[in-house]
Amino acid sequence: MHKLSTSIADRRVLLPNEARLVDQSRQAVLTERHLLPVLTELEAFFLAVRSQVDAQLEFSLPIKKGRPYPYGQCLEISQAAQRQLQRQDLHTLALSPSAQSGRTAFLAFRRAGGELRQVWGDLRGEFFQNAFQLGTLYLDVSNDTVTPTKPKVEILPFTEARFVPIADYRHFARVAERYWQVQVYPNHLLPEWAPYCPLLYVAVDGRVMLGEATLYMVSLTQTGRFEPSEAVLCDAAMPSDLFKRARAGLADIAGTLPDNPEHGRDLALRACRDYRRKRWHVSGRSIADVIRSVAAINDTLLPETALRPITVHSTHISFATKVQNMSTSEFIKIDGVEYSLSSLSEAARRELAMLQATDAKLAELQRDVAINQTARNAYANALAALLPPA
């Protein structure tokens, strides 16, 4: 029986943004020479960079997924910081004396061939994180995007950061379930897309989302000839009730869909094998096309599968992220009218931030109610079993 290669552990290719040290021996020498003697000054420098990033993003992207900046914006902060660090006039920025020393060391390190690479992966088994490989250091300039009370910048040896690449889709699912508070199932709903995006997420409010359409994860399965996707699609068919609800949400856009989860499972596995035979892992859909197409599918799937619509004073509000020309934009839809968040006034964004923070708290409370209701039912059943005959 053919054994699927579901992990990146045996692959030498470096995936985009993979959380792995590159050129370790040379980078260790450069790190020891230029960076380790001035770690305090480096931290001051990166805090100054982060301050510039905050001034940009807190205004342009004040909210993400119902939480105010900087929650959940590790990617946006990391990308903005990388742009700052690549500026030709970086040496002219006005900084404190300590930050100036850190900048001088950083620029000398880079001129000598020191590596600065944006990386993404599993941080300590708790959440996905965007950070940097700086020589042999782990540099996180968005350390406060999960817990806002943490320091904004964290620098430590890369080998001590417990920051590892996502190995396969089961690894991804474990972190996603813990970090995003979702349930993860095999994508037996859309067989055509299953080789590229073999997972479905179900949020606490019932919304279903196809995933994971990112540069790293699509590259992972293409590099593995769709075997990583096939490995997780082999799992038991997704629940029938979930399949029916998600299928109904896509009825208007997806064309012919499987009749049931078992049918979808067979078709998804067949698609992986067909795409491999046709060498679509080499010459099939581009990653950009996958990202755009899956974003369009999720734009329909997310609102259509919600069990509890968000309403405020009878005003229907929904939030979405769209991919346009490989960039992401946040939108809000109010009573059927779509607005770009960047078009809102500062006062409107403040009110929206408070609204979304309140909605997030309500969702958390509803989840707690559901958990406690389940526990109550279990206790009641246990008690009934212990009662003497009537």
Image: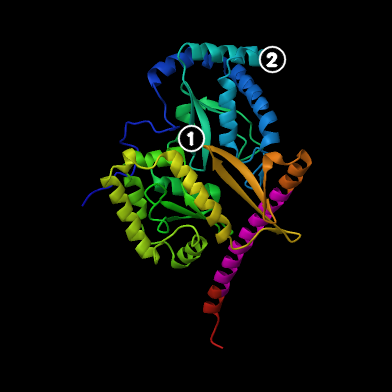
Q: Is residue 13 left or right of residue 56?
A: left
- Residue drawn 50% across and 13% down? 109
Q: Is residue 146 left or right of residue 28?
A: right
Q: For the residue carrying disc 2, how many other residues have a C-alpha within 10 Å: few (<14), some (14-19), or many (20+)?
A: few
Q: Quadrant of the C terminus?
A: bottom right
Q: Is residue 288 left or right of residue 358?
A: left
- Residue drawn 55% across and 15% down? 106
Q: Which amino acid type corresponds to the residue marked 2 in the rendered image?
A: Ala
Q: Is residue 101 above or below residue 231?
A: above
Do we see residue 166 in this rendering? no
Q: Which residues are magenta?
A: 355-380
Q: Nearer the viewer, residue 253 or 86?
A: 253
Q: Nearer the viewer, residue 360 or 27?
A: 360
Circle nearer the N terminus (1, 2): 2
Q: For the residue carrying disc 1, how many other residues have a C-alpha within 10 Å: few (<14), some (14-19), or many (20+)?
A: many
The answer to whether residue 366 is magenta is yes
The answer to whether residue 369 is magenta is yes
Q: Secondary structure at mark 1?
A: strand
Give residue 74's quadrant in the image: top right
Q: Secondary structure at mark 2?
A: loop
Give residue 321's quadrant in the image: top right
Q: Which residue is mark 1?
A: 120
Residue 282 picture location, percent across and down? 32, 38
Q: Which residue is mark 2?
A: 94
Residue 72 picture location, percent across and down? 60, 41
Q: Nearer the viewer, residue 7 or 197?
A: 197
Question: Predominant secondary structure in magenta?
Answer: helix
Query: Hey, which residue is sitting farthest right in the picture?
Result: 347
Residue 360 picture location, percent across and down? 66, 52
Q: Is residue 305 above or below residue 229?
A: below
